[in-house]
Amino acid sequence: MFLVDHSPIFIEAFAFLCREEPGVTLVGFSEEGKNALSEILRAKPDVVFVDAQLPDVNPLHFVRAIKEARATTTVIVLSLFASAELSGRAIASGASAFLVKGSFEEILATLQRLSPEQNHRSSFHSTRDPQGDT
């Protein structure tokens, strides 16, 4: 899995939860959308989580770009707020799901529902450790 989220705190929490969950591994993350696409193409994750409130790129255009570059990648949009309108636009842009941040169990359940045959395990790598170390 790969996470693109502007919040270092959310990235750190997400990475911790991934490490604690057997069979689930974060292969990379980025706090900025503008550099994330090249990192995603290099990491080749089966699932990408995209923050709906990315400040540096339009998240829906970003979802579309991911799907154009890697059609088999599952993209899930995460938001702090529930929004039927944003959810619909995210799905229309190519996202497989739209989830409200807050429940890691819901994220795991969605992963199983969308891709029960996939194993989300692989090695973690990134240009920056989620705890802030490089």
Image (cartoon, rainbow, N blue to C red):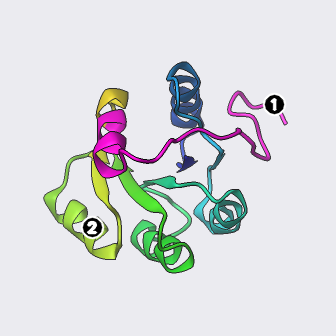
Can you say whether 56 is above or below 22 in the image?
A: below
- The picture quadrant where one finds residue 42 is bottom right
The residue at which mark 1 appears reads as 133
Horizontal side of 43 relative to 119 (left or right) equals right
Q: Residue at x 50, y 80 (%)?
A: 68
The residue at which mark 2 appears reads as 91
Can you say whether 121 is above or below 79 in the image?
A: above
Residue 22 drawn in magenta: no
Horizontal side of 93 relative to 16 (left or right) equals left
Amino acid type, callout 2? Ile
Disc 2/disc 1 C-alpha distance (Å): 35 Å
User: x%, y% of residue 9?
Assistant: 55, 31
Label 1: how many residues lie within 10 Å, few (<14), some (14-19) or many (20+)?
few
Q: What is the secondary structure assignment of the residue under circle 2? A: helix
Can you say whether 47 is above or below 10 in the image?
A: below
Amino acid type, callout 1? Asp
The one of 68 and 29 positioned closer to us in this rendering: 68
| The magenta segment | 107-134
Label 2: how many residues lie within 10 Å, few (<14), some (14-19) or many (20+)?
some
Q: Quadrant of the C terminus?
A: top right
Q: Which secondary structure dominates the residues rendered in magenta?
A: loop
Residue 129 drawn in magenta: yes
Q: Residue at x 20, y 48 (%)?
A: 82
**Do labels 2 and 1 touch, CB within 8 Å?**
no
Q: Residue at x 46, y 47 (%)?
A: 118
